[in-house]
Image (cartoon, coloured by chain):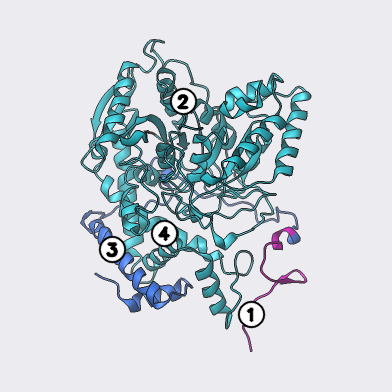
Amino acid sequence: MSLTLSDIGRIANLARLELSGTQSERMLGQLNGFFDIVEQMKAVDTTGVEPLAHPTAVIDHVSLRLRPDVASEPNNREANQQSAPAVERGLFLVPKVIE
Amino acid sequence: MSVQDLHQMGVAELAAAIADKKTSAVEAAQALLARAKQHENLGAYLAFNQDLTLSQAKAADARIAAGERGPLLGVPLAHKDIFVTQGFPSTAGSKMLEGYQSPFDATVVANLAKAGAVTLGKLNCDEFAMGGSNENSAYGVARNPWDADRVPGGSSGGSAVAVAARLAPAVTGTDTGGSIRQPASFCNVTGIKPTYGRCSRYGMIAFASSLDQAGPMARSAADCATLLSAMAGPDIDRDSTSLDHPAEDYTRLLGAPREGASAAQPLKGLRIGLPKEFFGEGCAPDVVAAVRAALAEYEKLGATLVDISLPLTQLSIPVYYIIAPAEASSNLSRFDGVKFGHRAAQYDDLIDMYKKSRSEGFGPEVQRRIMIGTYVLSHGYYDAYYLKAQQIRRLIAQDFQNAFTQCDVIAGPAAPTTAWKIGEMSDDPVANYLADIFTLPASLAGLPGMSVPAGFGAGGLPVGLQLIGNYFKEAELLQAADAFQRATDWHTKTPEGF
């Protein structure tokens, strides 16, 4: 299996990246080079093997904790927005999305 | 005591000198800051905040004056720029986060501050910790003090340089697929990645959440143990994957012989497993020679060597490079030019703003991994790639459990070669991925792993011995590394001119 330039365009759109023509060509070559080494995964028999997400789950049951649904952090809006590209009256500004 | 000598001290020595009033935390911080700035050409540090550093040092001196004692009280350290730190920019080595000021401290940073450590500055790294050479930093390369034309390894490259060039007695690093162990190996530094979940990931700018783990890098296993004891511990409310295990004193076994062993042979009874896959043709002869010599030293200390096999070692490369980019593509979706981070100056609409901001803010390696991750998680490909990789990940972890029935510790090289030349591999991403082969298996299994200076290869370049322990066996690993360092002096070697 090999990716094509149109696959690169589709994936870049999903990833919200903008690639120039030259960048897309380069990306195509590099990704296909990478997926060549991925092919060897096919040879491994994984029938009935449960996927491992949390590594220590291999020796012990791991359950992700939930905390009570209560506000635990103080209001820190000013500090949280100090690195925002555009804010006004405590709100994040984005380009108009509804005409 | 001369201020000129302060940079030559490790953590324990410096903490003792400060506690005994032979020097002060302020004097130590000033000396290290001056030295770090004198060696800015190495590219180790990305940011300083002298006023903040000195005010932290003054506070530590006040605690000492009030009678408090502690193994890190007043000791100056530096943090990999993956940890968010108040008062310093936190950039993850990315243009995306240029100048970013965090409103809070990472738990690891806060834990070390609580222990009285003083922050010297932020350390260079590969962008979002993606890379093994520090060449992917948006803020320039870091240089290996053993040969300034060579890479220091990565992604914790600046961290390794700071310790090796004596610009900090110890530092923090992070390890997702080898990012502590490989640069430690390239720079003759000792580093440990603990069991996944030991250190909180809160405030560690996320790369691959099921793999990311913080750890210390220092001049000795003993200093690493001191730092890890302060860094690690449960962070129940802030990191859902933080292990609910009580904090430990990782120095507790240092200097003591193993149970039933003697001082002459302190490691008697320790079975060291040597995976045959780590010593094959993929490993450079000079690296194998240094590692074999270190293992012979271990035999003198009483350990026995056992041949083992980790049959899926080769598969760890595709498995890791599916899982890590998949998680990265999700984690990095937060960088949209809205709440923080770079926003493009020109755009047409919201989607265009996202695309332009991300394409301008992320470097080429990060974009490659986002592309791989997006693809393997996309409709129709998830089962064949991501799910399959997670299944093989379980088999890899089980292989380790089988191996640990035959041995207590696994040993081999931390990397297949010594440090390469800057620029030598930068155009070949797949070659970079293949170079991670010996560190990826323990990362995928979430096991603790170390790199310990083991000697030198061709051209006088450092070689690291990797030690891998079973889950939660950090204290035993550090004991084994410490016993080696009491019998050898590789870890004390300093590059010429430093």
The location of residue B110, given as percent across then percent down, is 65, 41
Tag in front: 3 or 4 = 3
Separation of residues labelled 2 and 4 (CA atoms): 37 Å
The shade of chain B is cyan
Asked if the magenta segment contains residue A88, the reply would be: yes
Circle 3 marks a residue in which chain?
A
Q: Which mark is residue B325?
A: 4
Please tell me whether mark 1 or mark 3 is closer to you in this view. Answer: 3
- At label 4, the amino acid type is Pro
Q: Amino acid at mark 3?
A: Gly
- Distance from the alpha carbon under mark 3 to that under mark 4: 16 Å
* Chain ID at mark 4: B
* Label 1, label 3: how far apart the Cα atoms are: 38 Å
Indicate the chain on which mark 1 is placed. A
The subunit letter for the residue under badge 2 reads B
Inter-mark Cα distance, 1 to 2: 57 Å
As helix, strand or loop, the secondary structure at mark 4 comes to helix
State the CA–CA distance, disc 2 to disc 3. 41 Å
Classify B385 as above or below B174.
Answer: below
Task: Pinpoint residue B376: horizontal percent, then vertical percent.
Answer: 36, 65
B403 sits to left or right of A93 = left
Amino acid marked by disc 1 = Pro
Nearer to us in this view, B496 or B306: B496
Q: Can residue A44 be found in the magenta stretch?
A: no
**Disc number for residue A33:** 3
User: Residue at horizontal 32%, vertical 20%?
Assistant: B297
C-alpha span from label 4 to label 1: 29 Å
Q: Amino acid at mark 2?
A: Thr
Q: Residues within 10 Å of mark 4 (few under 14, many from 20)?
A: many
* Residue annotated with mark 2: B492
